[in-house]
Amino acid sequence: MNLGLDIAALRFDPAGLIPVVVQDATTGAVLMLAYANREALERTLETGRMHFYSRSRGRLWLKGESSGNVLEVVELLPDCDGDALLARAHPAGPTCHRGTRSCFDGEPAALELGWLARVVADRRTADPQASYTARLLAEGVDRLAQKVGEEGVETALAAVRHQPGSERLAAEAADLLYHLVVLLEATGVGLEPVAAELARRASGRRGKES
């Protein structure tokens, strides 16, 4: 994978390390700070997933190797002196081991669907016999639209039949959001136009609809 980084031009510290600030490529949020050595950066360039060097454990590590919350790298940018890196990445889930979106957050990870959209897109080429998502995509837009309608009804029924905050409502809402993301993938619309429309409304540009 070519991320355009010239490792030889970087200035590592006496321990052979360089600080890496990780930024969410979609939201711009700062997610974490860690350190990498040459081998970690080489592995990052080879795999497209962020690798670091753990100073406490004294070894190379893949971010998300145990949790699955990997960082898919979009861009690696050295600073003006070449002694620090900015890694723009797509997180596959909460970045911090505490379950928060960022290591600089104290709150649980907010609902962000970008990671789900990327998983759904990856499943497009999977075997429909082995992947429910691939099977849904193979069935086409009409069937997916029907599923979104069904899940919407089930979510509404859960809301009126169960107490607010119930696990049933949360589960039905998760089903609805999942099928909606699959439908957006199937139609080629994706999440970005939806996010842009919500941003326009939040800014007040849609008047009373905002």
Image (cartoon, rainbow, N blue to C red):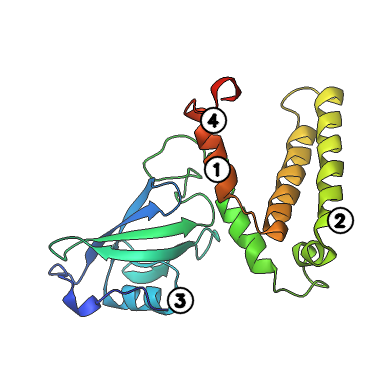
Q: Are marks 4 and 2 in contact (CB under 8 Å)?
A: no
Whether residue 88 is situated above or below residue 134 in the rendered picture? above
The total number of labels drawn is 4
Residue 89 sits in quarter:
bottom left
Rounded to the nearest whole Å, what is the CA distance between mark 1 and mark 2?
24 Å
Measure how far apart labels 1 and 4 are at the Cα level: 10 Å
Seen at 81% across and 38% down, the residue is 152
Name above or below for residue 109 compared with residue 38.
Answer: above
Please give the name of the residue rendered at 47% of the width and 44% of the height, measured from the top-left corner.
Answer: 101
User: Disc 3 marks which residue?
Assistant: 47
Amino acid on which the number 2 mark rests in the picture: Arg
Q: Secondary structure at mark 1?
A: helix
Q: Is residue 138 visible?
A: yes
The three-letter amino acid code for the residue at tag 3 is Thr
Which residue corresponds to mark 1?
195
List the residue tagged with mark 2: 143
User: Relative to 122, is 1 on the left or the right?
Assistant: left
Q: Residue drawn 75% across and 62% down?
A: 133
Neighbourhood count class around disc 1 (C-alpha, 10 Å): few under 14, some 14–19, many 20 upward: few
Mark toward the viewer: 1 or 4: 4
On the picture, is 81 further left or further right than 59? left
Q: Along the line of sight, which residue is nearer the eye, 57 or 38?
A: 38
Asked if residue 8 lies left or right of residue 124, the reply is left
Residue 20 found in image quarter: bottom left
What residue sits right under mark 4 in the picture?
201
Image side of residue 108 versus residue 156, left or right: left
Q: Quadrant of the N terminus?
A: bottom left
